[in-house]
Amino acid sequence: MKIYAIPAMEDNYIWSIDLDQGRIFIDPGQALPVLDFLKDKEVKESVVLLTHHHLDHTGGLEELKEALPDLRVYGPWETRDLNDTCVKDGDLVKVFNQEIAVLASPGHTEAGVSYLWQGHLFPGDALFKAGCGRVFTGDYRAQYDTLEVFKDLPDDTLVYPAHEYSLENLRFAKSLFPGSLEIDQALEEVRDQRQEGKNTLPTTIGEERRINPFFLAKDLDEFIAFRKKKDTF
């Protein structure tokens, strides 16, 4: 098993899980990067998992379905027009002899989901390295509760967010916690990675406990204050 980051658009990642029996793509916002990735690779059955309905996560589906006619799509209720199968919290997606758990992840969107598989979390825009998605729903409680679910996962859970926002997020985190050695160290590391053209992901739940201001918020009120500050940072 291998997990690949496929860069798309300005700062998106389409994650690919390559298994012996097939491939899983998470949130293909564009088709061309996926099709380029597949060139010269062994032909396998493919599946798509969608986390939410935003176009930068779903926009490549139509072209991918034309190129990969056996493609199957799983996603939440809000992507129902694109799905072959709708999934919800507590479901297990059974593909290629694997069982992938579905976690409800509302807040960024109304019915977003994340996928948890063998210690790997694919949260879409619900969680970033040192950040979380904008609360477009206005339901800050839902986003806060989503992060509380993530915080209950083991520290060594690997997290694969859908955007390369780590540098900006850590600059914001430093503005809130200027005395944090953990944040300073993470910021320096991410700066070096970006200067070398490397991606900064995956992160881990344990690392997020130390550097993510939305994990560090002591309660809902502080979370809301941090999130509103981030929106204007």
Image: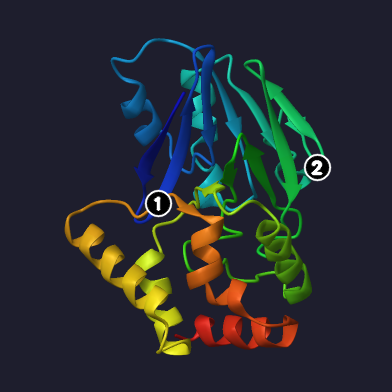
Question: Where does label 2 land, which residue?
Answer: 88
**Where residue 38 appears, x then y in whole percent?**
36, 22
Q: Work out whether 57 lies above or below 42.
A: below
**Where residue 136 appears, x then y in whole percent?**
65, 70
Q: Nearer the viewer, residue 109 or 95?
A: 95
Q: Work out whether 193 lies above or below 7.
A: below
**Label of residue 201 in the image:** 1
Q: Residues within 10 Å of mark 1 (few under 14, many from 20)?
A: many
Horizontal side of residue 6 vs 106, given as left or right: left
Q: Secondary structure at mark 2?
A: loop
Q: Nearer the viewer, residue 98 or 75?
A: 98
**Quarter of the rendering occupied by the C terminus:** bottom left
Q: Nearer the viewer, residue 143 or 48?
A: 143
**Where residue 165 appears, x then y in whole percent?**
41, 64
**Amino acid type indicated by mark 1:** Leu
Q: Work out whether 30 lies above or below 144.
A: above
